[in-house]
């Protein structure tokens, strides 16, 4: 899962994918065989697959930036060492091109054996029967101990025939992505400002705003600061912390017109419109928040674990903290993302495809490589609470990652929705609030009936 930004909110990646076929070479049986492989505790992979298996090639497609591609090339090389009869053809696609690329491959009958799946497309794929039920494969491998894998990550890929969240596993977590609040510690120290605390609930929106005002620098006096206090403050975090929500999935009721929601949305908008501590739309277009943070021109931002490799190269000190709490509730919340590995139900090599997904998701050696290279928090709980926390690389407050996973992280808004048109409409028109054309209360009152109509039409 990669970092995307839009004005004062994260860009929700909404992909419309239809999976119907997958190319392969041989071994067309769809029954799993016992795969008690790769459960070593050492730092090196070992070949326990024997030499009697026929060579096969499987295709794996994901998306990401060059850093993620490099990391997965290393992980796949380790997998091929472990399973010498398997060759993996790996394709990494830029996130914005992933949907179209997969659609083209499907239409030509060349869809990959293993591919990224997440959010609403997982629901659609599972319901349509186009991804493989992995439960029997998991029951046949010692790699899988569900008590040692983050429950929020596993639940994202369960399906019981009616809804997501319970039932058999149809995917394995690529990662679980706690969306943290990152800050430039050097800027805080230079201004003599106490940094945001790691513990949830100890820093409120008011505290954040006071610090942001001190950390915003407008040397030219033209209202366009050279250094901003905060950027990409997520609407999800603000709404959830304030006691609001986008939707109640149990009832199907869209909730954006409630006070807890529109008050939080107005707070986010006012960071620019009233306080000028966050870049406006024009400023974001000229230089986005990510680049500003890397350049040392932004004090507070948002980051996922996958950003670590780039941040390790920064010439200033940085750390992560809990997202600020709403003064109205005292609560903290943030987005807990995840991308999964799915296996095509049409794969001609289901066992080898599963072995790859399991290695990337569950294998101890693979997970160690993953976190050491800065790609993710380990999916394995004992590793995350042990050696991952003990590593000497930034961030110092690594426990924040785990606090989000265990305590106050929430799935992204469309995770349990079959169709995303209802939430897409919201994000497409939210700029009217960000640029001050209408208030959040006016906007949400107007947009809620339209969102409700779309949700009812395509999700019930």
Image (tube, grey):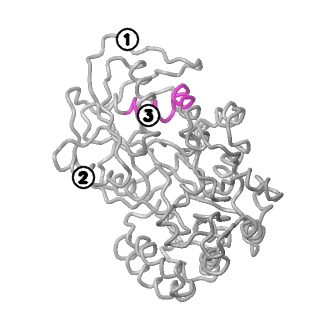
Q: Residues within 10 Å of mark 3 (few under 14, many from 20)?
A: few
Residue nearest the observer in this picture, 191 or 78: 191
Q: Earlier in the sequence, mark 2 or mark 1?
A: 1
Alpha carbon distance from label 2 to label 3: 24 Å
Say whether residue 106 is left or right of residue 185: left
Residue 229 within the segment the image draws in magenta: no
**Mark 3 — residue?**
70
Which of labels 3 and 1 is toward the front?
3
Which of labels 2 and 1 is toward the front?
2
Badge 3 marks a residue whose secondary structure is helix
Which quadrant of the structure image shows residue 147? top right
**Mark 2 — residue?**
103
Residue 361 within the segment the image draws in magenta: yes
**Tag on residue 50?**
1
**Tag on residue 422?**
none
Marks 2/3 in contact by CB < 8 Å: the verdict is: no
In the rendered view, tell whether residue 314 sits above or below residue 454.
above
Which residue is the extreme one toward the front?
220
- Can you give x and y, in whole percent of width and height, for residue 46 in the image? 48, 15
Alpha carbon distance from label 2 to label 1: 37 Å
What residue span does the magenta drawing correspond to? Answer: 354-369
Q: Earlier in the sequence, mark 2 or mark 3?
A: 3
- Main secondary-structure element of the magenta-colored stretch: helix
> What residue is drawn where x is 41% and y is 31%?
73
Badge 2 marks a residue whose secondary structure is helix
């Amino acid at each position: 899962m990669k970092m995307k930004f839009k004005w004062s909110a994260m860009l929700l990646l909404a992909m419309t994918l239809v999976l119907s076929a997958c190319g392969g070479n041989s071994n067309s049986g769809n029954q799993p065989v016992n795969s008690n492989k790769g459960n070593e505790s050492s730092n090196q992979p070992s070949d326990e697959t024997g030499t009697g298996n026929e060579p096969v090639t499987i295709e794996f497609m994901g998306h990401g930036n060059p850093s993620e591609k490099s990391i997965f090339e290393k992980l796949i090389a380790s997998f091929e060492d472990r399973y010498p009869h398997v060759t993996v053809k790996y394709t990494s696609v830029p996130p914005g091109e992933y949907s179209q690329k997969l659609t083209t491959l499907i239409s030509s009958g060349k869809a990959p054996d293993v591919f990224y799946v997440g959010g609403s497309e997982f629901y659609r794929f599972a319901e349509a029967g186009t991804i493989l039920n992995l439960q029997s494969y998991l029951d046949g491998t010692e790699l899988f101990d569900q008590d040692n894998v983050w429950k929020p990550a596993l639940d994202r890929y369960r399906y019981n025939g009616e809804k997501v969240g319970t039932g058999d596993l149809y995917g394995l977590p690529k990662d679980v992505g706690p969306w943290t609040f990152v800050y430039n510690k050097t800027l805080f120290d230079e201004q003599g400002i106490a940094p945001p605390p790691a513990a949830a609930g100890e820093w409120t929106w008011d505290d954040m705003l006071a610090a942001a005002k001190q950390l915003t620098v407008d040397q030219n006096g033209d209202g366009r600061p050279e250094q901003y206090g905060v950027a990409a403050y997520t609407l999800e975090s603000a709404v959830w912390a304030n006691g609001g929500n986008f939707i109640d999935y149990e009832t199907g009721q869209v909730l954006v017109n409630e006070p807890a929601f529109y008050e939080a949305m107005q707070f986010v908008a006012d960071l620019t419109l009233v306080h000028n501590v966050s870049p406006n739309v024009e400023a974001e277009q000229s230089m986005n928040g990510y680049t500003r943070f890397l350049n040392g021109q932004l004090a507070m931002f948002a980051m996922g674990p996958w950003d670590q490799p780039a941040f390790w190269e920064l010439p200033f000190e940085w750390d992560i903290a809990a997202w600020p709490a709403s003064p109205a509730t005292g609560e903290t919340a943030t987005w807990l993302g995840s991308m999964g590995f799915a296996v095509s139900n049409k794969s001609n090599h289901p066992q080898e495809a599963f072995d790859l997904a399991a290695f990337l998701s569950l294998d101890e050696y693979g997970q160690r490589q993953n976190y050491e290279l800065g790609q993710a928090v380990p999916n394995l709980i004992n590793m995350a609470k042990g050696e991952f926390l003990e590593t000497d690389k930034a961030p110092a407050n690594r426990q924040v990652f785990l606090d989000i996973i265990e305590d106050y992280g929430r799935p992204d808004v469309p995770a349990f929705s079959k169709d995303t048109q209802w939430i897409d409409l919201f994000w497409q028109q939210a700029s009217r609030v960000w640029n001050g054309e209408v208030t959040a209360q006016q906007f949400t009152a107007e947009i809620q009936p339209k969102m409700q109509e779309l949700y009812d039409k395509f999700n019930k």
